[in-house]
Image (cartoon, coloured by chain):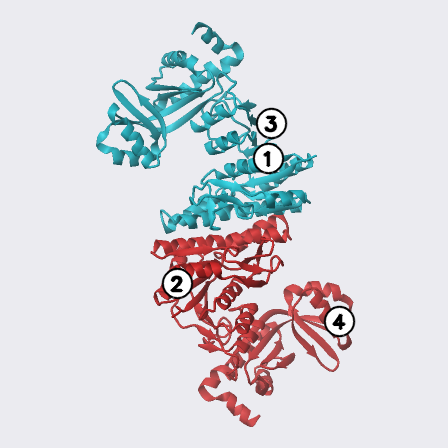
Chain colours: A cyan, B red
């Protein structure tokens, strides 16, 4: 019988010190002793990537892309070696592998490369010897043998891609929170850890501001049907298991995007504004079309560039925040959410209803209040009173 | 006509900061603009290797050898990328290469690997495109694709091996001194930079304590007839050119080895002591055989181990220093050096005459005085008075 295989991914804070690397080693050993083959993906020690980027920026504000990848990948090389040493010290055979050695092939899009395929032969050979295999996250190699990186957060993608290629039972993403929450706990204090979540809901939450998982990681896992589990590096617990095609919860959670800008233009200019944003590589987070006016919402960081290029056609621009309620029944809460927020003196500037999400545009100083009102009504109350069902009944 | 090729090697202090990397880039550009193809070998930024070793030692005092190599090689990956970025910023095409990418093949002796061969195809392809090629020093790859290191100081060896494989016109070793000196300038203030030096003298000086070049680097260059030039990274100048088979100077220089230990034993135990040292991997710097007593001189660091193993057979051990006068006529100064040192109240415990060196064993508190006496007599005086020739005449 084939031994089950687990991929574990540890982020920068999880390997941020020798002590923490030791804790990580213990989690790996636990999985190994439970009878699993274990492949570990590590990020650079926290702070290291920023330190290296700072060095590069002292040379050039836009450093040569190929060389930036060479520079940044040194970060994971350090953490993976330290982790392998720790496992050896604790009596376990472990081998670290760079992106090149693990044959993680990517395209040549330096600083933001996409994984094209993984030849799992070298990893599988080591696993068969009983080794724990530690792979550098975030990095790969292109067809010329040049080092590439997957862009920030790419270690999650590395882990999921490896889990898919190795047909792993589960891809465990260890992080500094103990799972996916119904809302951002810094904003909504009674946010709850979700024991389970489906892929469509997780995708929508990641797209709309939940930072616990990067969107491409969720999309890859969904596409390849790799069950994902988000766990804490520092505490015990079951975390959140993300799997399954169907959105089973009426309301799964609420995602928040602060620091956004709404840019208004004439309705007939909207398509031109959207294509301009695409040309500049700016993600349009929300599009609003009404009878007389139109608007897009984009991240504030990107807004200066777009405003410069589109200058005279912009009617108005203002800072906003977005709240996105995710679930299978969001169409049923449009009216009530407007009502609840109005009662709470929150002004909803626009709303956008999609298949399993309702996005509300509010002013930045009201977003926390709004999140708490909706969380209380649709997540806390649902558990205690079946609130949503009632509305549907009357709706 | 083939363009001349120069290999330039920059050590850790030369690339120790972004500013210094900028100075290094200017030296490279100068060589490039002079019509040379340029291959650059870099060490890790000064302090970086020690920082990484410290991290490893927090985990294990003897870290796993394979993983230590993975860890340490991250150091050059950083410096080579920063240097390539700087060259790009200054308008020059440059490509960095890890030991693996540059196909520097080594044996599998982790932490102290030997280069077996270099496939120069990828470097030559880049040179033909007009690129400056920057290669990580100190590192290579074994037949399994594992990362290896050549041991401390291995960047010099990388540079010389590359210069040999690429049939370079010259291998320039940039360092924090502006050439090879007739003695250690910290000990003998009127030490002079030697504009030229032959391989046999340089080998003897490197073997006997001159730190400017590592012994394996000199030996490799000699064997492959690669002219070596030692230059300062911080000042302009011609440095020291090392080439040629023949020892042309009567006296080339004086090397100093402090922190040594002399271990005495019975004459009949000497060969056993030497083979014991070899078994322990301890270099025997000097062997003294007299009618009734015998002794070896080894580095103090290594002495505890040897003393433990050889314990009861040791008659005496004491801290000593070695002075080695190097040149083609050292046989002519045995008598006079004893005389001069005796006049200066330096007690010479032993001496050892070899083909082109005379090694004197003195007590650690007299080594500086002794070095100054001999340097004045044989190097300063030779220039001004032809001192040595006179002695030869009377000798």
Q: Secondary structure at mark 4?
A: helix
Give the Cα distance between marks 2 and 1: 49 Å
Same chain, labels 1 and 4: no
Which is closer to the viewer, label 2 or label 1?
Answer: 1
Check contact, mark 2 vs mark 3: CB within 8 A. no
Give whichever of B243, A143 is nearer the camera: A143
Give the Cα distance between marks 1 and 4: 59 Å
- Mark 1 belongs to chain: A
> Relative to A64, does residue A231 appear above or below in the rendering?
above
Give the Cα distance between marks 2 and 3: 56 Å
Q: Secondary structure at mark 1?
A: loop
Classed neighbour count for the residue bearing mark 4: other residues with Cα under 10 Å, few (<14), some (14–19), many (≥20)? some
Pick whichever of labels 2 and 4 is earlier in the sequence. Answer: 2
Give the Cα distance between marks 1 and 3: 21 Å
Which is closer to the viewer, label 2 or label 4?
Answer: 2
Q: List the residue tagged with mark 2.
A: B28
Is A183 left, or right, of A132 in this rendering? left
Check contact, mark 2 vs mark 4: CB within 8 A. no
Same chain, labels 2 and 1: no
Same chain, labels 3 and 4: no
Looking at the image, which residue sits at the far left? Answer: A312
> Relative to B174, does residue A201 appear above or below in the rendering?
above
Q: Which mark is residue A142?
A: none
Q: List the residue tagged with mark 4.
A: B272
Picture coordinates of residue A285, whole percent (x, y): 37, 28
Give the Cα distance between marks 2 and 4: 51 Å
Give whichever of B193, A199 is nearer the camera: A199
Q: List the residue tagged with mark 1.
A: A167
Q: Secondary structure at mark 3?
A: loop
Pick whichever of labels 1 and 3 is earlier in the sequence. Answer: 1
Give whichever of A317, B143 is nearer the camera: B143
């Amino acid at each position: 019988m084939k031994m089950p295989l687990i991929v574990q991914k540890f982020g920068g804070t999880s390997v941020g010190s020798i002590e923490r690397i030791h804790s990580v080693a213990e989690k790996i050993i636990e999985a190994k002793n439970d009878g699993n083959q274990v492949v570990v993906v590590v990020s650079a020690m926290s702070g290291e990537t920023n330190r290296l980027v700072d060095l590069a920026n002292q040379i050039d504000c836009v450093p040569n892309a190929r060389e930036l990848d060479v520079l940044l990948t040194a970060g994971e090389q350090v953490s993976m070696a330290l982790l392998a040493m720790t496992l050896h010290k604790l009596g376990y055979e472990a081998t670290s592998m760079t992106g090149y050695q693990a044959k993680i092939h990517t395209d040549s899009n330096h600083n933001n490369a996409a994984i094209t395929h993984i030849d799992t032969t070298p990893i599988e050979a080591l696993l068969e010897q009983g080794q724990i295999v530690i792979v550098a996250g975030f990095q790969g190699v292109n067809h010329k043998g040049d080092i590439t990186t997957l862009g920030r957060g790419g270690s999650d993608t590395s882990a999921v891609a490896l889990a898919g290629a190795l047909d792993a039972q589960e891809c465990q993403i260890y992080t500094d929170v103990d799972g996916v929450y119904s809302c951002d706990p810094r904003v909504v204090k009674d946010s709850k850890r979700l024991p389970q979540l489906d892929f469509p809901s997780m995708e929508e939450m990641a797209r709309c501001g939940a930072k616990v998982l990067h969107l491409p990681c969720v999309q890859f896992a969904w596409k390849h049907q790799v069950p994902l589990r988000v766990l804490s590096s520092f505490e015990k617990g079951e975390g959140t298991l993300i799997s399954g095609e169907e959105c089973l919860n009426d309301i799964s959670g609420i995602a928040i995007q602060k620091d956004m800008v709404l840019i208004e233009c004439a309705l007939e200019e909207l398509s031109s504004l959207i294509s301009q944003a695409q040309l500049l590589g700016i993600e349009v987070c929300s599009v609003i079309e009404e009878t007389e006016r139109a608007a897009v919402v984009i991240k504030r960081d990107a807004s200066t560039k777009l405003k410069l290029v589109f200058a005279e056609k912009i009617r108005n621009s203002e800072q906003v925040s977005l709240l996105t309620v995710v679930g299978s029944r969001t169409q049923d809460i449009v009216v009530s959410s407007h009502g609840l927020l109005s009662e709470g003196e929150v002004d909803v500037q626009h709303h956008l209803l999609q298949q399993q999400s309702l996005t509300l545009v509010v002013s930045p100083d009201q977003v926390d209040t709004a999140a708490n009102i909706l969380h209380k009504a649709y997540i806390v109350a649902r558990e205690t009173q079946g609130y949503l069902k009632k509305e549907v009944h009357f709706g």
